[in-house]
Image: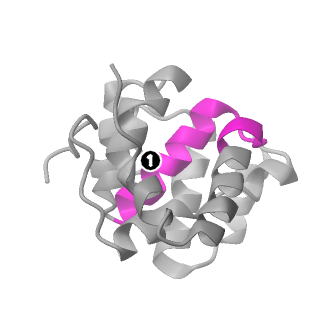
Amino acid sequence: MAHEPLALFRLLQLHPELASRMRVLGAGLLAHGELPAPDREIVIARVVARCGCRYEWGVHAAVFAPVAGLTPEQLEATVSGDSRLPVWSDRHRALIRAVDELHDTATVSGVTWAALAEHFPAPELLEFRTIAAVANGVALEEEPWAVPYPGR
């Protein structure tokens, strides 16, 4: 099914120089990032859920997360649960805790970094946050074909 370009991309075209830089960053993280796809999508879903960014959550839930192997229960948990839910492995619990700490305090505790380091090499730990602030900052409407944001 064909769709028109994402609202985010249409918006960014109002500033072509910024759009060209954001495109490189986004493509770099999605196609060439160090985090394995399931981990990347958990981080993205959790970051945008904690930011209340329905736009980006719905796009990733519809397009990227299923391809990466996330279950509907895991996607729901990125919005309505915490790291203790049984849908998460120890590896994913560490990711959820790190995202939550960054969101809440702008830092990651030593305990959480140690938990992350058990599962991830340093380059993978650098790939955390970006698009939610842009999409929320300009109040993008959700794509009509995106997965609806759970329970809100």
Looking at this view, is 8 or 68 the one in front? 8
- Check disc 1 and give the amino acid type: Ala
Callout 1 secondary element: helix
Q: Position of residue 66 (x, y in %)?
A: 44, 23
Residue under the image location 59 percent in, 60 percent down: 98
Crowd class of label 1 (few under 14; some 14 to 19; many from 20; radius 10 Å)? many
Tell me: residue 122, above or below residue 138. above
Q: Position of residue 14 (x, y in %)?
A: 47, 70
Residue under the image location 32 percent in, 43 percent down: 58
Residue under the image location 42 percent in, 46 percent down: 84
Chief secondary structure of the magenta portion: helix
Q: Position of residue 76 (x, y in %)?
A: 29, 39
- In the rendered image, which quarter contains the C terminus? bottom left
Classify residue 73 as left or right of residue 149: right
Tell me: residue 115, above or below residue 67. below
Please give the residue where the numbered disc 1 appears in the rendered image: 45
Residue under the image location 35 percent in, 38 percent down: 4
Direction left: furthest residue: 151
Q: Is residue 85 visible?
A: no
Residue bounds of the magenta highlight = 30-51
Q: Position of residue 8 (x, y in %)?
A: 42, 57
Q: Quadrant of residue 89?
A: top right
Classify residue 79 as left or right of residue 110: left
- In the rendered image, which quarter contains the N terminus? top left
Q: Quadrant of residue 16?
A: bottom right
Whether 147 is among the magenta residues is: no
Whether 41 is among the magenta residues is: yes
